[in-house]
Image: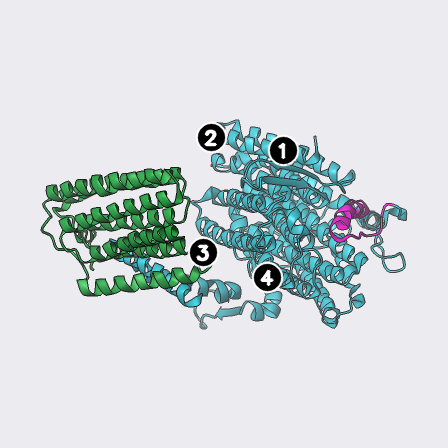
Amino acid sequence: MSAVALQMVCVAGLLGLAALAIVLGRSKISTPVIYGATLAVSVFALAGALRSLLGGAADATTLTLPVGLPWLGAHFRLDALGSFFLIVINLGGAAASLYGLGYGHHEHAPHRVLPFFPAFLAGMNLVVLADDAFSYLLCWEFMSLASWALVMAHHREPGNARAGYVYLVMASFGTLTLLLAFGLLAGPAGGYGFAAIRAAQHTPYVATLVLILMLLGAGSKAGLVPLHVWLPLAHPAAPSHVSALMSGVMTKVAIYGFIRVMFDLLGQPSWPASVVVLFLGSITAVMGILYAMMEKDLKRLLAYSTIENIGIVFASLGLAMAFQANGLKAAAALAFTAALFHALNHSFFKSLLFFGAGAVLTATGERDMDRLGGLIHRMPFTSFVVLVGCVAISALPPFNGFVSEWLIFQAVLQSPELPQWALKIMVPAVGAMLALAAALAAACFVKTYGVTFLGRPRGTTAATAGEVDRFSLAAMFSLAALCLLAGILPGLVIDALAPVASQILGGRMPAQSGQAWLSIVPIAESRSSYNGLLVMVFITLAASLAVYFIHRLASHALRRGPAWGCGFSDATPAAQYSSVSFAQPIRRVFGTLVFHARDHVTMPPPGDLRPARLRIELHDLVWNGIYAPIASAVGFSSTRLNRLQFLTIRRYLSLVFATLVTLLLVLAIWS
Amino acid sequence: MQMHSIAFDISHTLAGGLVLISLMMLYQDRLYSLLNVFALHALVLSLSVAWQAFIQDAPHLYVTAVIALVFKAIVIPVALHRIVKQLGIHRDIESAVGIGPTMLAGMGLVALSLVLMLRVTSDADPLAREDLAFALSVVLLGLLVMVTRRNAVSQVVGFMSLENGLVLAATGAKGMPLVVEISVAFSILIAFIVIGIFLFRIRERFDSVDVSALDDFRGERR
């Protein structure tokens, strides 16, 4: 059986599970049965994808099913790029299913989640497998609808209906732009198969339009600023393991779509296109993390952080386009590999962090960080793995986030080789923006971890929380282990990504397997190298020695002393740093510009016993500047057009008649 | 050559006659006379189709002609006569727009369709061109009848004459398959039955088939 047929069997299995979930309905056994079977199918599909990526996937396998458009059929194809994204999807799917085995027991409406969960996974797999525009769009829409149903699983909770609505509007808009993009690519002859599109010559005019449409379509699904508005609403609204899938995996499917069209179908990219992608990517990275910094809802913060990481990936893809347009194959392969590596890493640690947020939500029922705190005592294992996730996403060695961001900066450092002055000047600026985003991300996750897990509990639920179940912990620990493994053995990942780069770009990074001590060398030994394993060994040794000497030379006994309360004798937990107060310096520096942030302090007059109040005013300029005017324009015009619904039959006929006559007149005058 | 020219003239005359009868429909302000003109319309259509069948040597078009003759020229007008009699509305005068403006609009539409069709299809067979131009006029005039009438029965008649225009276009263009023709004929028949039933329901409910009664019922201002 060919590799693609194997994957299609897995997809069929997932769809069958969705049907089974409908049959099982609300019965007790449905949760373990569905998640267990989804786990098995995902692992199977993952193994198939790994085999096809590692075992010489240069020869793509295809499959044509006699469904869909009668003259086209449904084409499916598995190549190196597809295999890589299938690995991301099915790894995320397997982890989410494992997590769901435990987390699903707390679900009060499992019949609203279970049928859509395998369907959503099947949809994402199908998008990656599709090999013609029609199947691609159909699967894309299926994926969107399945995830929309999951967002609406808890539809009675406040805000979720609005989240679902905004998501639906944005998803429809995205699909519309993709439809137009594929229409342009197929051309007047209507060659909707990807093979035909790849073979055709595209004029620069078409390529520019397709770039804009793909940035709108794939960008709205991935969360490029300013198309990100649905993401922080919809991702947190879904159950946590689905949030992990949407944030960690579905955004990657959007990136897949962008790569497939811009690099594969459109052929050679042009350098002005890369300027646009670089610009949007870097803006998205900084804006995303600034939004995250201002946020105090744990899951919304993670969703905003996804936007930042998508920005990093897009900036790196922009670099790859710039290098590829100038024929710098090695540098292009470096940037491209770094982008894919970061996408993979982000799927690891973002899923891990969403699982952690779900664990906190299960244990305390809270998502607001300012009511949490001190969870490290109540949930030691969860705290440990979330710490791993926070360190990884903050791009600190020896974890995986560092490696991919380091590779991206290595690619940025190749910019002097670019011939265009615009790029020569812009790429270092993009590097600076990415560095800013990375630093802000570290600050953001210090805040997240510190406020949620350290300090003293700010509420009774946080004070009485308990550790979560074994399945959830197993899922989180396996992802944490993957974060560490990818961080200390990056050479393996880079070598595994080589077929993808050579398929898409025609070039690859130098093989890392021959390097001594498992170092990675992106360009040449003389330029730069990194060894995650040695860094980890050093960190471990240094930390162990420090701990040993402190305990050896100081005291073994654990001593508890009174904390210094800044002169207050009975400091309440509310006096601790909150997420808002932690973010205050950054809000002062960036918020005034980006959010028009204002702090209002209300001081009671002397003698009044009321407490002083601090009120913070933040404006989402993207929403107020783009979406609110569009919404009010649509509202205004639909109120006006509403009168059309109440005309007499004769007037409707007259309207039809008048339209027909007008069109005929136009034709008569025009031709 | 001479034969061809005669064939052309006759089909031209029949199609032109169809347009003329469509224009006649515009100024009929009594239902009975409108129905009679409609029957004449369908009769000319069936003659035209039969002539097309003869000159194109396409026997299946004779079936279309017979369908047009039996259903549109006989069955439907007779049935509509009975409906009008049962409803007791044969005295109604019911055009929403005056005869003068309607006739002017009708002439404008004929001119528009002639200008348009002759220009758009400049490289087609002359017979098909003129046929299409006349057919488009008939369609537009049928719509005009529907728009300018208040009474549901006369709107039905307008719809049927519109469909006659479609049949004219299809037969002139050499080659609507028989299956399509029959299905069109049946759909018209079914539409006629459904509309007939609705007419009686409207009548039962509102004591009138003036569609403005429906609007009053919906609480609309006009």
Quadrant of the rendering where the C terminus of chain A is positioned: bottom left
Nearest to viewer (mark 2 / mark 3):
3
Q: For numbered disc 3, what is the local secondary structure?
A: loop
Nearest to viewer (mark 3 / mark 4):
3
Image point (14%, 55%), residue name: B29
Q: Which numbered circle lies on residue A10?
A: 1
Residue under label 3? B124
Nearest to the observer: residue A89 or residue B135: B135
Q: In this rendering, would B160 be left or right of B8? A: left
Measured in 3D between alpha carbons, the distance from the residue under mark 3 to the one under mark 4, in whole angstroms, is 38 Å
Task: State the cyan chain.
Answer: A
- Three-letter amino acid code at disc 1? Cys
Colour of chain B as rendered? green
Q: For numbered disc 2, what is the local secondary structure?
A: loop
| Span highlighted in magenta in the image | A490-513
Q: Which numbered circle lies on residue A209?
A: 4
Determine if the magenta segment contains residue A431.
Answer: no
Image point (78%, 69%), residue name: A419
Q: Which numbered circle lies on residue A26?
A: 2
Nearest to viewer (mark 1 / mark 4):
4
Image point (74%, 38%), residue name: A52
Nearest to viewer (mark 2 / mark 4):
4
Q: Chain of mark 3?
A: B
Determine if the magenta segment contains residue A495.
Answer: yes
Measured in 3D between alpha carbons, the distance from the residue under mark 1 to the one under mark 4, in whole angstroms, is 36 Å
Determine crowd level at label 4: few under 14, some 14-19, many 20+ residues with C-alpha closer than 10 A.
some
Determine crowd level at label 2: few under 14, some 14-19, many 20+ residues with C-alpha closer than 10 A.
some
- Three-letter amino acid code at disc 3? Ala
